[in-house]
Image (spheres, rainbow, N blue to C red):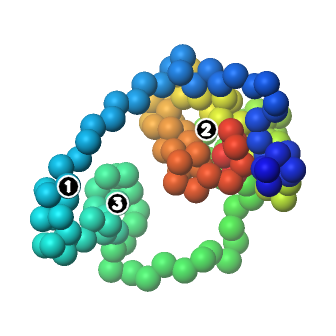
Amino acid sequence: MTQRGKGDSLAKGYISELWDFTRVSIAQNNLQELKEIWDQKVDLVPTIEEYVALLRCSRIHVDRIYSKAVNVPTFLRKLMNITGMSEQWVTAWIKQKGDSRCIPWKTLKDLILAHPDVRKRVDVLALSIYGLVVFPKTLGHVD
């Protein structure tokens, strides 16, 4: 109800096309096996070193403390850096949703499928996962 009130929800009568390109496979976990893992007190949260290895972020120094940068690039500049697209392209796709500036997921999906630079495809995919799954804010958009 809150999302509909703020305009961040799907319109009435909308039929999702998600099933056309998404498949979900579900498996029942073995409860006993999970209990054994929890009893070992294994930390399942990745460390900074593991994130560095997974994301191949060679510029990150694990022995330093990071703080917020003073001169943070604008949303437009961040999108230009991540996507590798021109300022005109990025400006054309930025939308204002409530108090957030964002870009539609469909635009990012099209870019992932068509971008000539494979590394930029991966960057845009990572941005999409981050914005849609890890920290979703506006339905169908990445902020």
Q: Residue at x 62, y 21 (%)?
A: 17
Front residue of 92 and 22: 22
Q: Residues within 10 Å of mark 3 (few under 14, many from 20)?
A: few
Q: 105 above or below 78?
A: above
Q: Nearer the viewer, mark 2 or mark 3?
A: 3
Which residue has dot 2 on it?
A: 84
Tell me: 36 left or right of 107: left
- Residue 125: x %, y % from top left: 50, 38
Looking at the picture, which amino acid does disc 2 mark?
Answer: Gly
Q: Note whether residue 81 is visible.
A: yes
Q: Residues within 10 Å of mark 2 (few under 14, many from 20)?
A: some
Which residue has dot 3 on it?
A: 51
The dot on residue 50 is none
Q: Residues within 10 Å of mark 1 (few under 14, many from 20)?
A: few
Q: Note whether residue 110 is visible.
A: no
Looking at the picture, which amino acid does disc 3 mark?
Answer: Tyr
Q: Residue at x 60, y 39 (%)?
A: 83
Q: Residue at x 73, y 54 (%)?
A: 75
Tell me: 52 left or right of 4: left
> Circle 3 — which element?
helix
Q: Residue at x 34, y 30 (%)?
A: 25
- Residue 47: x %, y % from top left: 31, 69
> Circle 1 — which element?
helix
The numbered mark, 3 or 1, whose residue comes first in the sequence reads 1
Which residue has dot 1 on it?
A: 31
The numbered mark, 2 or 1, whose residue comes first in the sequence reads 1
Front residue of 73 and 101: 101
Q: CA distance from mark 3 to mark 1?
A: 28 Å
Q: Nearer the viewer, mark 2 or mark 1?
A: 1
